[in-house]
Every structure is written in C-alpha cells, then in structure tokens.
Image (cartoon, rainbow, N blue to C red):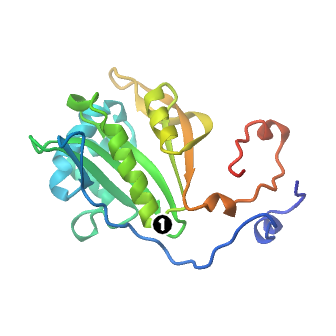
Amino acid sequence: MNNRKSMNSLWLDMPEDVQVRQGCEPIDWAKLEQKIILDGNFIVREATEADLEGASEAYKTGFPALKGCDFELLFTPDGFAPFVGQGETFNKGNNFLIVIEEVATKKIASALIITMWKMLRRGELLVIATHEDYQAAGLGTEILNAADKLFEDSGVEMAYGWCAGMHTVTQTILKDMGYVPRAVVPGLYRLWAGEGEQYRRTVEVFFQKFYGGAEEMCTADLNLLPEIEKLLIPWRK
C-alpha cells in the first residue's frame, strides 16, 4: 500500500512496480483491410461517405432507443459529420466508422463507430448497430473483431467499451475478445423508453482490454477505501 497524501506526489512519484515506455508521439489509424466474412455473404470494411445513408438506416432501425440522445444524429446521413468528419477529414480524426456490407444487395447491414485518443493511445467501442433485417446474422461479433484488430494494429494500449447490463450476448462477445468486465454502472446513458417522448437511464457493464502488455504500465500499489477495494478486479498476475 502507498500512503501518498497529495495528488501532486501521487502523479509525480514513480511507482516501483511499473514498466515505462519511451516516446510521446501520437498514434494514428492503421489501414483496415476489407475482409470477406460469413461464407462470402458479407464484407467488413472501412466506411466511405457513400455508405452514410445505409449506415443511418442501420442505426435508425437497429437501435431506435438512441432517440433523444446525442447518437440520434446518426439516424440521418448528415448527422455523421460531427462524429467522423466529412470530405478530406472523413475517418481521419479521433472517430472511425466501420461497416458490414451484404455482398448480394450492397446494403449496409451493420455499422460501428470507434474512438481512438491518439495521444493517449486509448480506444473506445463507441456505438454499434445492426440493421433490423440482419439482427440474427452474427454481424456484431464480426464488426467488433475488426475493430479489435484495428485498435491493435494502430498501437492502442488500452481500449474499453460499454454494453447493456441486460444483454448477455454482447457481454459474451466482448469477454471472448479478451475484454475484462470491470464494473456495472447504473444510469450511464439516457435512452428512449419506446413511447412518445419518455426516456429512461441505462445500466451498463464496463469492459476493458490491454494490448501489448500495457497492463504492466499500471501500478498495483494502491490505497483504496475498503468499499472500493471490494470491487477491485486485478489486471496483473
């Protein structure tokens, strides 16, 4: 246990049990190679601006509970610009849109926006939706695996995501990808309640994953209140 008494010393004193790395330069998005999946019926790939109409339909039909929150912008093609840019800046900033396209129809079946804080080398699985016509096709697993590889190839050291506390399918997908559940957080998002203008607040499970041994950069020398220590899930062996 450490007994540092000021925030200043907490951040500036180097714990003895951490690994350090050199360099402070930002990372950037690696190239996402398109991949044929599910017996050749679908392709997972980086989105283009031509995909935005189809992606908006995926969010609108596949995740209608986004109504009333910031992500409702994704129900229209024009609403993607604040998230992933437009023109020369499309998919070049901190957010990146991945889509799954059905080969036979060219229809966008699933969409996922992920975030990468380039200086922090940190990623987030931001918001995913699968079109109502493809809900049982297993596309969520495929698009999340593509995001996972993109994070790793881009040099992300830690990524995290939230999934519904009522949906064990999504929880299982993240767990199988190597994400570790860290907490159950009530009230994180405001979502449409499905009738009129009523809304509710969600209960989310927080998942986290380290890449390239970055967990060794985090000290295990902590000083926690007893009620917080009960919640601790170790990240180092």
Helix, strand or loop at disc 1?
loop
> Label 1: which residue?
155
List the single residue furthest toward the left.
105
* Above or below, 166 relative to 214: above
* Above or below, 161 relative to 151: above
List the single residue furthest toward the front.
39
Q: Indicate the position of residue 113 as horizontal and vertical percent values.
A: 35, 50
Taking the spot 68% from the left edge, 63% from the top edge, the residue there is: 217
Does the image show residue 83? Answer: no
Packing grade of label 1 (10 A; few <14, some 14-19, many >=20) is many
Q: Quadrant of residue 115?
A: bottom left
Horizontally, residue 91 falls left or right of residue 77, namely right
Taking the spot 87% from the left edge, 61% from the top edge, the residue there is: 4
Q: Indicate the position of residue 176 as horizontal and vertical percent values.
A: 49, 39
Q: Quadrant of residue 89?
A: bottom left
Compare residues 187 and 101 and report the one nearer the observer.
101
Compare residues 76 and 51 and report the one nearer the observer.
51
Q: Indicate the position of residue 206 as horizontal and vertical percent values.
A: 56, 40
User: How many labels sit on residues?
Assistant: 1
Taking the spot 55% from the left edge, 50% from the top edge, the residue there is: 209
List the single residue furthest toward the top.
195
Q: Indicate the position of residue 175 as horizontal and vertical percent values.
A: 52, 39
* Above or below, 8 relative to 168: below
